Image (spheres, rainbow, N blue to C red):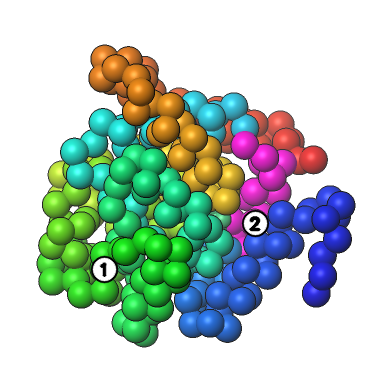
Amino acid sequence: MKIPKNHPRYNSLMQRELIEDGVKRGIVTQTGMIAHGRGEAFDYLLGEKTNPEARKQIGAAAAMLVLAKRPVISVNGNATALCAKEIAGLAKAIPARIEANIFYPPEKRRKIIAREFAKLGAKILGTKPTKKIRGLGSARSNVDAEGIWKADVVLVMLEDGDRTEALRKSGKKVIAIDLNPLSRTAQKANIAIVDNITRAVPMLEKKAGEFRKKGEKLLRAKIKQFNNKKNLDSVLSRMRKGNTK
Ligand code: ATP
């Protein structure tokens, strides 16, 4: 279906097309479509725009990523279908490794995801995971020895709470992009960015580029000032007041 550019919900409809296409190409699972639908509902409640809380969250997250010694961006099928190009750009700007991590089989999805990034000139990890994150069932516990296994900061998107918890228990800092401020992921992350990945990832890239030129002291202060719970509470009250377009 050709969506007219002036359609009031153009971005949201385009994302549906990308997810549908991702399913056809074996990148996204059918369950991934359900997760997308949940995201779409929360995005609607947020007015389908980046709100002031998200800007603060993005600032703190960019500071943490730039200061990290071994940052890794963890990608799944939905993230790849929606914004592989933008993720590749963010990885360059930080700089960070990218690793494919999947919840649902088939395992060959790791290779399909890696191929999508290869088309963009980005070589990613996760096709041959040899290590396991403790406390997790399913394929998502399997990680690359040079990627998430050794990472000090992991950026996750469209994730479930168990994984965020397990990553934190293994001593890593977790930044999550999740449109649901009530999700366990958002609550358990060190920094939760409540925004659509299609908007948040390019903004993170821009901020990371800016922050690479700044001193360590300033970036540390940004992280110190940030309070995840306070920000999530503020997003929730924005939703309650009604923030739709
Ligand atoms: P939890 O276990 O953290 O409580 P969950 O069971 O909902 O959450 P998943 O199904 O893995 O876990 O959730 C995917 C999350 O991603 C949902 O919170 C959904 O709102 C969010 N989401 C979906 N699409 C997007 C998107 N495009 N950008 C950001 N977040 C999204």
- Give the side of residue 192 with respect to residue 190, left or right: right
Residue in the image at 87% along x and 52% along y: 6
Q: Which residues are magenta?
A: 37-50
| Image quarter of the N terminus | bottom right
Q: Nearer the viewer, residue 6 or 38?
A: 6
Q: Residues within 10 Å of mark 1 (few under 14, many from 20)?
A: many
Q: Quadrant of residue 131?
A: bottom left
**59 over 123 or under it: above or below:** above
The stretch drawn in magenta includes residue 82:
no
Q: Nearer the viewer, residue 193 or 25?
A: 25
Q: Residue at x 26, y 31 (%)?
A: 67
Secondary structure of residue under mark 1: loop
Q: Residue at x 71, y 54 (%)?
A: 11
In the rendered image, residue 44 lying in the magenta stretch gets the answer: yes
Which numbered marker is on residue 40? 2
Between the residue at mark 2 and the residue at mark 1, the CA separation in whole angstroms equals 28 Å
Residue 1 against residue 233 in the figure, above or below: below
Q: Would you name the residue on which mark 1 appears? A: 126
